[in-house]
Image: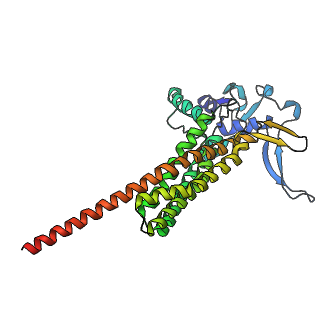
Amino acid sequence: RLKVNRAQAAKCGADVQLSGSAIQWITTGIKVGEYRPDDADEEIDIRVRFPSNKRSLDHLAELRIPTQAGSVPIGTFVSRQSGAATRTIMRTDMRRTMLVQADLAQGAQISPVLEKFKAELPKLDLDPSVSLRFKGGAQTEEETIAFLWKAFGLAMAIMAIILVTQFNSLFQAFLILTAVMFSTGGVLLGLLVTNQAFSLVNSGIGAIALAGIVVNNNIVLIDTYNKIRQSGITAKEAVMRTCTQRLRPVMLTTVTTVMGLMPMALAMNIDIVNRDIFFGGPATQWWRQMATAISGGLVFATLLTLLLTPSLLMIQANFSHRWRTHRSRAKVGSGKQHAAA
């Protein structure tokens, strides 16, 4: 760093601009024009500077600046200080940026590390004008999580509209969507049993894929219940018949899906050419969490479908029966009062 003493330079009849121009003689040179050869498409700068054997900071003390008072050594009012060099200046959105990079340790998750890092930031006592932004894996995960939430919410909204229009019942549509929400408990339980970390990206994709299977099982069960009820059978008998008829299809769906996902959940690799079976590998990390999420959530949701859904249907039937009985008694009581009057 070259620091100019402005007061001393003014006494010598020099200024910062004149000092900078003189220093350029031993560095990059002073641009005096441009020239474009006939065989070139771009112009070439024409610069004036000292010979190569005199272009170094060691010759700075020998440099003299012509002023009105004569030739003055530049060292009279310019001092040299050592400092950190800035080779490149990065800018993001027109703001000067410094990039700090780090890699995670093997097996570490980015979310806990970020939480600890954010907790330590106030201790650094940074200038208020400095703003921080997490990029790289943290930014990618944040964008993916936002996309998954939007996708899950849109999927639930579309399913709700279709279910309400087909079943013509808000309660039954809400019942099916509740089973989808409860199935996330099985996702967490499956990851806990297999001792796997919960990843919002991999497990989130598995939860969204799981929603289609859970909805299908509940639609089949409720549709069968509605058709049996239309024949005039009581609600309790209809629930019992529905569970009996749909037990095997629901169980077959669960067993075949879970068994089909088991190789991915176990990170099993099969080499047909070399006739070798091994577990693990870099390519299985993504699919293992997703397969585990679907398998665990489906097993848990099957229990909900066969136990909770029929129970809630029975509760709906009992509530509807009591409501109709109460209204009929109210009508009979009002009719007797009018007759007595």
Q: Nearer the viewer, residue 219 or 297?
A: 219
| Residue located farthest toward the left when viewing the structure as drawn | 341
Residue 123 percent across, percent down from the top left? 51, 26
Can residue 10 be seen by looking at this rendering?
yes
State the residue at coordinates (71%, 48%): 260
Residue 128 vs residue 323: left or right?
A: right
Q: Is 226 situated left or right of 97 in this image?
A: left
- Looking at the picture, tell me which residue is in the foreground, 331 or 212: 331
Residue 248 point in image, percent of width and height: 60, 54
What x and y, as percent, mark residue 301?
54, 48
Is 284 situated above or below 248?
Answer: above
Location of the C terminus by quadrant is bottom left
Q: Is residue 201 visible?
A: no
Q: Quadrant of residue 317?
A: bottom left
Instruction: Give the side of residue 114 with respect to residue 175, left or right.
Output: right
Quarter assignment of residue 35 = bottom right
Quadrant of the snapshot with the N terminus? top right
User: Where's residue 73, x and y in %?
Assistant: 73, 27
Which residue sits at x=58%, y=35%? Answer: 192
Q: Residue furthest right?
A: 39
Q: Nearer the viewer, residue 206 or 28?
A: 206
Judging from the image, the colouring scheme is rainbow
Number of marks drawn: 0
